[in-house]
Image: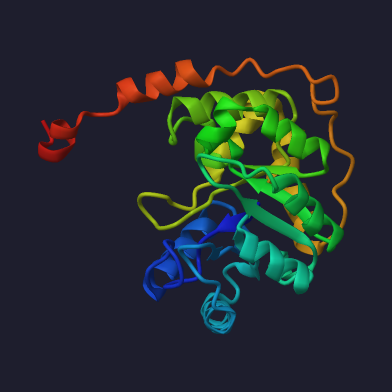
């Protein structure tokens, strides 16, 4: 398997805090059957993308992990105006190994009116856009047509592995599973941030997808498509996304599932005192 979304570079964002954690995460991923990790530090309003430091720590990790797992470099690229300007001025800079595939992240709560123009600008600069974890954005959960529009414009979709079996709540679980049923997913990745809260686990999800959608689908989402992204080559022929061209609305009900998530969430005093 190849994990195309993984915060392995230590000390640059909210992912791995130190070298020891990074080595632990990489070795755990290797034990899960991952042969390559695409390291994706954030570039956002909260986190800079300090490329010299990132490249230095990537080289350090490659040396220490040689023979254990291979590493690539990309970015968890937030769709801010400054980022889009820089990415179009420096074509392919933020993409996976500089070969074109770019992981893009949106604001949780709002999609800017100029977003379609920003996506077109990036595509015109040569990027193949991968929308990361749309199942976890409240704004997309309530307006799933956003995702359909992005896909119709040529964007690909990456879902977080743990979403499919409920680690990010019932809304993300229901949404991601309907995307799986409709062939609206191109990649499944860990979005690992550490070894405990957000671990680099893919094996359980590979087996989950295999059992629900078949071995061919699991192999495509975890191996074949990620390999193409790393190599910078076009994806092989994909199954037709059900209902996308016909504009058939998803059955997913954001209000109901988010209410269920709220019911499952402990109240303030219970969270504070553990009672």
Please give the name of the residue rendered at 57% of the width and 69% of the height, measured from the top-left corner: 68
User: Which quadrant is the C terminus positioned in?
Assistant: top left
Q: In which quarter of the image is residue 122?
A: bottom right
Q: How is the image coloured?
A: rainbow
Please give the name of the residue rendered at 54% of the width and 32% of the height, measured from the top-left corner: 164
Residue 175 x %, y %? 58, 26
Residue 251 x %, y %? 63, 15
Q: Quadrant of residue 103?
A: bottom right
Please give the name of the residue rendered at 73% of the width and 41% of the height, measured from the top-left corner: 186
Please give the name of the residue rendered at 58% of the width and 63% of the height, measured from the top-left corner: 40
User: Number of marks in the image?
Assistant: 0
**On the rendered structure, is 242 left or right of 77?**
right
Using the rendered image of the protein, determine whether residue 36 is visible from the camera's viewpoint.
no
Using the rendered image of the protein, determine whether residue 252 is visible from the camera's viewpoint.
yes
Which residue is at the front of the view, 131 or 183? 131
Relative to residue 121, is residue 223 depicted above or below?
Answer: above
Q: Quadrant of residue 158?
A: top right
Residue 119 x %, y %? 75, 51
Residue 115 x %, y %? 69, 47
Relative to residue 215, is residue 62 depicted above or below?
Answer: below
Which residue is at the front of the view, 65 or 242? 242
Relative to residue 124, is residue 65 depicted above or below?
Answer: below
Q: Looking at the image, which residue sits at the far front? A: 113
Which residue is at the front of the view, 91 or 17? 91
């Amino acid at each position: 398997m190849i994990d195309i979304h993984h915060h392995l570079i230590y000390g640059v964002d909210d992912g791995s805090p130190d070298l020891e954690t990074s080595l632990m995460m990489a070795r755990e991923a290797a034990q899960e059957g991952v042969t390559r990790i695409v390291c994706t530090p954030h570039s956002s309003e909260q986190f800079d993308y300090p490329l010299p430091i990132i490249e230095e720590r990537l080289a350090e990790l490659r040396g220490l992990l040689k023979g254990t797992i291979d590493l690539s470099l990309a970015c968890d690229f937030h769709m801010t105006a400054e980022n889009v300007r820089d990415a179009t001025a420096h074509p392919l800079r933020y993409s996976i190994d500089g070969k074109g595939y770019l992981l893009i992240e949106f604001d949780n709560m709002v999609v800017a009116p100029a977003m379609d123009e920003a996506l077109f600008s990036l595509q015109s600069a040569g990027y193949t856009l991968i929308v990361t974890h749309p199942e976890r954005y409240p704004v997309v959960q309530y307006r799933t047509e956003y995702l359909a529009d992005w896909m119709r414009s040529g964007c690909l979709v990456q879902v977080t592995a743990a979403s499919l079996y409920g680690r990010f709540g019932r809304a993300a679980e229901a949404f991601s599973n309907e995307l799986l049923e409709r062939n609206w997913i191109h990649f499944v990745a860990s979005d690992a941030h550490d070894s405990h809260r957000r671990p680099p686990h893919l094996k359980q999800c590979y087996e989950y997808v295999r059992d629900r959608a078949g071995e061919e689908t699991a192999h495509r989402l975890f191996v074949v498509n990620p390999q193409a992204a790393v190599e910078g080559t076009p994806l092989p022929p994909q199954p037709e996304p059900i209902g996308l061209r016909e504009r058939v609305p998803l059955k997913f009900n954001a209000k109901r599932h988010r209410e269920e998530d709220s019911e499952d969430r402990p109240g303030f005093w219970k969270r504070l005192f553990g009672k």
